[in-house]
């Protein structure tokens, strides 16, 4: 499942619950700053600062989840603004549903089918939450805006 390692790491660090999955694995990354892309460092610094608000963390995780699964076919700029405008309770519900679908995909023995099913669930979530469509009908967006 694209991006699942990052999602699990941040969920564990931030203590975010997921309905059907409880990870018992903690991943520690030891990186040489000079060998890591600045975009990754920017995200890591945001998440490792003292107690980021849960709202900001959920926005970042949902944005990452859509980017990991749809790449530049998702209008990340619009998605970011729509996510920021949602209340914490709604973001928590959206993220729990998306994370459950991601964990189910990761547990599947058929990667191609799992990816199709995950993308279908993410599209359904996007439609229900009025996220921008994942169609590729907009200019490609850069990674981690």
Image (cartoon, rainbow, N blue to C red):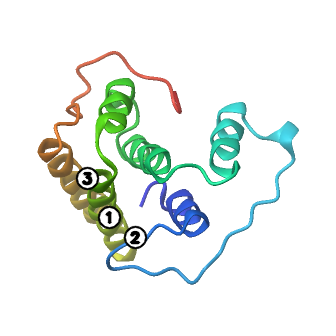
Residue that badge 1 annotates: 96
Residue that badge 3 annotates: 90
> At 56% across and 57% down in the image, what residue appears?
6
- Coordinates of residue 20 in the picture (x, y in percent): 33, 79
> At 75% across and 61% down in the image, what residue appears?
29
Dot 1: element = helix
Labels 1 and 2: the sequence-earlier one: 1
- Coordinates of residue 37 in the picture (x, y in percent): 72, 35
Labels 1 and 3: the sequence-earlier one: 3
Labels 3 and 2: the sequence-earlier one: 3
Rate crowding at label 2 as few (under 14), some (14 to 19) or many (20 or more) other CA atoms within 10 Å.
some
Q: CA distance from mark 1 to mark 3?
A: 10 Å
Whether residue 9 is situated above or below residue 40 in the rendered picture:
below
Whether residue 111 is situated above or below residue 95 in the rendered picture:
below
Dot 3: element = helix
Of badges 1 and 3, the one in the foreground is: 3
* Position of residue 90 in the picture relative to residue 24 (left or right): left
Dot 2: element = helix
Query: In the rendered structure, are the residues bearing label 1 and label 3 in contact, judged by CB atoms less than 8 Å apart?
Result: no
The answer to which of 98 and 83 lies nearer the viewer is 83
Rate crowding at label 1 as few (under 14), some (14 to 19) or many (20 or more) other CA atoms within 10 Å.
many
Whether residue 59 is situated above or below residue 29 in the rendered picture:
above
> At 20% across and 44% down in the image, what residue appears?
126
Which quarter of the picture shows residue 2?
Answer: bottom left
- Coordinates of residue 110 in the picture (x, y in percent): 31, 71
Q: CA distance from mark 3 to mark 2?
A: 24 Å
Residue that badge 2 annotates: 106
- Coordinates of residue 119 in the picture (x, y in percent): 25, 52
Farthest residue to the top: give it: 139
């Amino acid at each position: 499942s694209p991006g699942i390692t990052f999602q699990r790491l941040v969920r564990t660090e931030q203590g975010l619950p997921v309905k059907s999955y409880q990870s018992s694995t903690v991943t520690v990354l030891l990186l040489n700053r000079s060998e890591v892309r600045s975009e990754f460092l920017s995200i890591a610094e945001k998440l490792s600062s003292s107690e980021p608000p849960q709202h900001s963390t959920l926005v970042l995780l949902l944005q990452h989840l859509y980017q990991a699964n749809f790449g530049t076919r998702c209008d990340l700029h619009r998605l970011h603004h729509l996510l920021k405008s949602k209340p914490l309770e709604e973001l928590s519900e959206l993220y729990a549903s998306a994370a459950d679908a991601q964990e189910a995909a990761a547990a599947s023995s058929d990667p191609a089918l799992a990816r199709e099913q995950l993308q279908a669930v993410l599209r359904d979530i996007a439609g229900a939450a009025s996220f921008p469509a994942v169609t590729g009908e907009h200019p490609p967006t850069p990674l981690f805006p």
